[in-house]
Structures are given as structure tokens and as C-alpha cells.
Amino acid sequence: MQKEPLYTIRTLALKSGVSMHTIRAWEKRYQALRPQRTPGNRRLYTEEDLARLQLLRQGVADGHTISLLAGLPTTDLWRLVHGRSSIPAEPETMEHSHAVEALLENSWRAVQNLDDRALQQSLHQAAALLSQPVLLEQLLAPLLQRIGHGWSEGRLRILHEHMATIVIRDFLTTLRLACTADPEAPVIIIATPAGQLHEMGALFVALTAAAQGWQTQYLGTSLPADELAAAAHRLDARIIALSIIQPSDDPQLPLQLEILRNLAGSETILIAGGGAAAFFAPLLDRLSIHFIAGITQLREFLARERGRGQRPQP
């Protein structure tokens, strides 16, 4: 007997953490869901649809493409997401490569034209089509690099950089807050140390952790070591993640890291990454701060620590 539909698309989006725009795109392009329709052509979804959508969201966050996931039965999706099975990595097709390139060019053009709405539209389209690692590493990272070069070479003004930063920051925050955290999952605090003002790397980390089910607390830029340690103790955080972008010769960073290591205690895991982190590798090693070389390594590290850091039942 067929179950009665329960949810409108708006309710489904709120419950699943997947935007309405993305749900529609996945349905239209990949037939990922097959909702029932009212006489007025409104979509209606069942509990089974909600469960499938949550599995699709997690699969995309784990690095699989929606084009591959959408064709799997829900039982196979469950096995994949819960580590009971695996599927071969999907080879990057020419079509996929062209899609990423087109999205990057559309986003770049929107920045050049100071068109925040066009940039928002391009980013949301990318979120609907790309896996999360591809979104971060092949679209957003190159876009931010291109914006930085454009500003330094005089092809963009500061106003272009500010507009793009605001749109991308809001976009990443929306994706992060849409992720559903397990209340028993460990806590990770993400910030940049005092004197470090570039936050995009930290936002990448926050989204990656949230997509893996961590309870994330993003605290922004230039946070003094004593405040980071206080937050870790207050929230019983398992990990403090630091993004270190520039400068690579930051004179106050060594002392800040020393203070944080002492105040946070040996039970709190400290990790650091970003463009300038490698310059401090000997110091990081001495302070037992794990150096993370990129998003792929971050995802692997968080996956290992997730089980170890599970919160005990009250």
C-alpha cells in the first residue's frame, strides 16, 4: 500500500538540509527523487523520499557525484554512506570537466561585472551539480585564486574582492548550517589565529566538517589563543582547527600557537592548514599540531577522528 505523501518541497528542504533549488535540479536532471503531485502540480514527498535525500546529501559530501548516486537504489545508497559497500570512483568525463569550467567562467564573469545575484546563482547551480570536494577544490579555490591575482594585477578593484567575499562567505555558511549534526558527534572549533585575517580556508574546513556530521563552531578570524582555548573547554571540543593563510612570516603566530597548546591541554587535538602553515612545519611538529595539506587529507583525518571522538551518552 502506497504511503500518503507528507512533505512539501519547502518542508523537505528544511528537514533534509538540501536547498529547494538543489532538490529541483537533482529531480530534473538526474531523477534523483520522484515526488507525487497534487492536482495543482505541487510536489509532495514521503518519509522514504526524505531518507533518500539525506543519503544523497551525505554521499555528495563524501565526494561522490550526484550523477552517480542518483542511479542507485536507496538500499545501495544506505550501504555506501554507512561504509557497508563501495563503488568505483567515477572517471572525470569531458562533460564533467566542461561543466566545472563553465561554472568557473560564469562565476568569474559575475565577479568582474559586480553582479552578486549572478554569482549567487552560479554557486548554487554548482552546489546542485558537483560533489562537495569538487565544489571546493575545483571551483571555489580556483575562483578565489583568480580573484586574488586579479586584484594584485590591477584588473579588479577592492570592491570586486569585497563583493565576491561576501557572496562566497554567505554561500558557504548556508551550506554549513544546512548540514544536520549528530547531537552525539564530537565538536570541532574552527578559526584563524590572532593576526590571520583571511577566512575562506577556515570556512572550507567548517563546511567539510559539518558535512561529515561533526558539531561545528566557527569563530571567525584573528582569535587570540586564550579565547580559542576557552571555547574548547566550554564546548568540550575534540578538535581545534586553524587556518593559516598569510603572512608566512607572521611574527606573533609562534607565541600564539605555544599559548594555545598549553591552554588547550593534551586531550584537545590541534590541526592547522592553509597556504602559510607549511612554513611553520617544525613548530607545528614540536607542538604536536597536525599539519593538514588539503581538503582530501582533512576529510580523511576527520573521518578517522569522528568515531574516536564520539560523545558519551549522558
Image: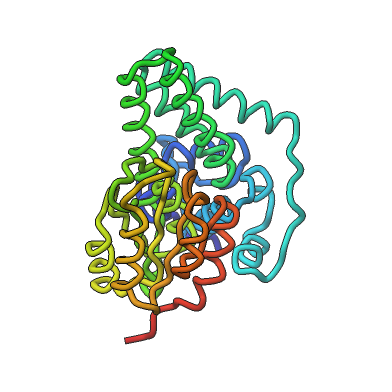
Give how far across and how far down residue 35 sits, in percent. 51, 46
**Image quadrant occupied by the N terminus:** bottom right
Give how far across and how far down residue 104 sits, in percent. 55, 26
Q: Residue visible at 33% across and 45% down?
A: 196
Which is nearer the eye, 80 or 157? 157
Q: Residue visible at 44% across and 54% down?
A: 5
Q: Is residue 83 above or below residue 106?
A: below
Q: Is residue 268 above or below residue 170?
A: below
Which is nearer the eye, 85 or 91? 91
Q: Is 141 left, or right, of 90 in this rendering?
A: left
Count of residue discs:
0
**Image quadrant occupied by the C terminus:** bottom left
Q: Is residue 125 above or below residue 269?
A: above
Give how far across and how far down residue 199 sits, in percent. 36, 43
Give how far across and how far down residue 164 sits, in percent. 37, 27
Q: Is 184 left, or right, of 223 in this rendering?
A: right
Residue at the far bottom: name it: 314
Q: Is residue 278 above or below residue 145?
A: below
Which is nearer the eye, 247 or 144? 247
Q: Residue visible at 41% across and 48% down?
A: 244
Q: Is 147 left, or right, of 196 in this rendering?
A: right
Q: Quadrant of residue 82?
A: bottom right
